[in-house]
Image (cartoon, helix red, strand yellow):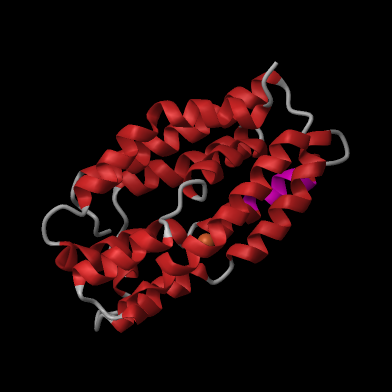
Amino acid sequence: MIGAGEALRAKIELVLPGYLATVRAMWDGDAAARYPGYLAMLHTVMRASVPLLEAALAECRARADRDPVAGRLAGYYARHAREERGHDEWVRQDLAALGEDPDGPLAHAPGAAVAGLVGAQYYWLRHYHPCSLLGYIAVVEGYPPSPGWVGWLRRTTGHPAAAFRTLTRHAELDPGHRDDLYRLLGDLPLTPEQESAIGLSALHTLRGLIALLGTGQTGP
Ligand SMILES: [Fe+2]
């Protein structure tokens, strides 16, 4: 029998080529002009990272005395919320380095693509089980840009290095976060239904990212 981590990775990799093709297509053309809008879009997603983790943590704590998976997850979500804190601030700093208004991403209501991508996670963690958020994390932190690609984007756009701290730091940090997640998946006493929910969450996240990035509407 394959483990929960291997099964999740296999599901993700079925859809991954479509996602990666969407990312590549997004940077065809005028990457310099597209980059500020991409950062604004990133902010709409990343400002929900810590609140999502805290919502999952609260659900875990409410269930921990009768639910061994929730009990184990609480420690992970508490630690990961600390690790992710302030990353949306890096996006604001990147926008400022481009001469853009760092509060720009807050000026308009994010579109339905972002709400569908992130909002589904609140529903599942609250109304099914907080383990579902692991599928989202496996996608958004599982396939970070490589340092080489970030360098390519910086050279291609001609923007200052100070405008790339979000991507540069995630290229460094996310491989470790991905390893932590898959170690956890190997240890959790997940039920088959919970494993399915994590897979559904991951596939929904990939579809949501493809919709968000593929529309060309990278702004909020
Ligand atoms: Fe992050």
Where on the picture, by quarter, is residue 117? Answer: top left
From the viewer's perspective, is 190 left or right of 66?
left
Q: Where is residue 196 in the image (x, y as percent from the top left)?
A: 59, 23
* Figure check: 153 above or below 198: below
Q: What stretch is highlighted in magenta?
A: 55-61
Question: What quarter of the picture does the N terminus occupy?
Answer: top right
For this rendering, which residue is in front, 5 or 40?
5
Which residue is pictured at 55% across the width and 46% down the height? 137
Q: Where is residue 217 in the image (x, y as percent from the top left)?
A: 20, 52
Q: Position of residue 27 (x, y in %)?
A: 21, 54
Which residue is pictured at 69% across the width and 25% down the height? 3
* Magenta segment, prevailing SS (helix, strand or loop): helix
Which residue is pictured at 41% across the width and 65% down the height? 167
User: Is residue 56 inside the magenta stretch?
Assistant: yes
From the viewer's perspective, is 77 left or right of 87?
right
From the viewer's perspective, is 27 left or right of 195?
left
Where on the picture, by quarter, is residue 184? Answer: top right
